[in-house]
Image (tube, grey):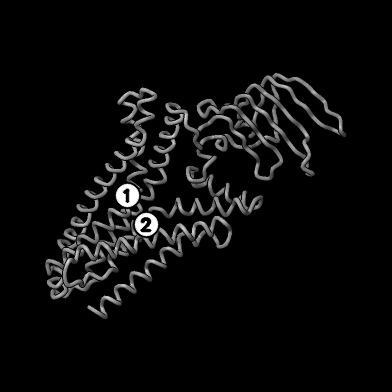
Amino acid sequence: MKLLDRYIISSILRVSLSTLAICTLLVVAVEMFSSMNDYVTNALPFQEILYLAVLGLPEYLMMCASVSFLFGTTFFLSQLESNNEMIMLLNAGLGYRRICSPALVMTLVVTILAFIFSQTIMIDAGIEHDRLSVEHFGQTSTQDSSNISVSSLDGSCIVDSSYFSQELGRLFDVTFVSKDDEGKVRERIYASYADWSPEEDCWVLHEGRSYEVEDGIVEASFFDKNVVTSLDIQPQMFTSQARDIRTMDIPSALSYLDGIRRIDIDMWYQSATEFILRLTSPLSIFVLVAISLLMNYRFKKNIFLFSLIQSLCTAVVYYVVQMLISIMCEQGIIHPAYSAIIPVVTVLVLSLSIRFIGRMHG
């Protein structure tokens, strides 16, 4: 039985990884061709072009992984049917579930590895890719650390800065505005720069001036150093990752969602949907392979062609349903969790229906 398991796993992996490599290279080629004008205009060295392509590889790999494993599984099962190997295995007393089990286990392992990959290497590479794009081409990006405006979750204070240095943990050209319970401006501070103080859990502003409003009277003062205890926005909230929930680390994202749900429910629906899609995107590998395993392969001729067509059509249904449900979730019509649940249930029901119809008319 171990020999059979190795045969099934190696056959699917060999075709899937070959397809993944080819599809990824095609996507890289298209991406490089579309950016060729930027490369030539900015006289970018070949080493930098190659480095940008390498940084884009993790995202392209994840983009092509699900379809590649769908193709690999469909190819393997269709070949078993067309070469009558499936009949031989069934006559040997092996049920169809036994044949599918190694493929499911292998796919589950691949999905877990893809999840870890997508939450670590892919995010880091994407951030670096966007940073270099801003540096070389002047493109705007959520990863750009210039011209930052951050508000506390309760809206009591707003911080604007021309630049944040993650290496120094320092904000430059800082404007801090705090409001009272009625939403009126209570204090406004300008500073040349601000440093985070871990000991006091607040920001320390340097070389600036302060305007404080009390009983309708504005009092102005200058300072060399000002410890603002009410300014407790963590430094990571000024980083590139903190401005896009798709690149936040998971604990920060959960904390952000918990806070924003109490402040702005509409924004919570949108952010929660994006976060759930980010976490469940590797699940598409497992779902599409499951679709392939549930398909009907009992065609009288052109088994591979018809098997591939029905698998791809079901995959298209999966992505279309996911897109539609995601839009509904972002608009607050249904809970964001359904953006992951409904597409999976839909295609599984569709695949089982196709297999049942195939048995009835096979």
Q: Is residue 305 left or right of residue 204?
A: left
Mark 2–mark 1 Cα distance, whole angstroms, equals 11 Å
Quarter of the N terminus within the rendering: bottom left
Q: Is residue 77 left or right of residue 28?
A: left
- Please report the residue visible at 18 percent of the width from the left and 57 percent of the height from the top: 11
**Residue 9, image x and y in percent?**
21, 58
Q: Nearer the viewer, mark 2 or mark 1?
A: 1
Callout 1: SS:
helix
**Residue 309, image x and y in percent?**
27, 63
104 over 23 or under it: above or below: below
Q: Are marks 2 and 1 in contact (CB under 8 Å)?
A: no
Residue 284: mark in rendering? 2
Q: Earlier in the sequence, mark 2 or mark 1?
A: 1
- Per the image, the residue denoted by label 1 is 64
- Please report the residue visible at 15 percent of the width from the left and 71 percent of the height from the top: 89
Image quadrant assignment for residue 296: bottom left
Q: Amino acid at mark 1?
A: Cys
2 over 134 or under it: above or below: below
- Please report the residue visible at 55 percent of the width from the left and 62 percent of the height from the top: 334
Front residue (pair 214, 359)? 359
Residue 13: mark in rendering? none
Quarter of the C terminus within the rendering: bottom left
Image quadrant assignment for residue 346: bottom left
Crowding near pointer 1: few (<14 within 10 Å), some, many (20+)?
A: some
- Please report the residue visible at 35 percent of the width from the left and 36 percent of the height from the top: 34
Q: Amino acid at mark 2?
A: Ser
Callout 2: SS:
helix
246 over 195 or under it: above or below: below
**Residue 284, image x and y in percent?**
37, 57
Front residue (pair 21, 321)? 321
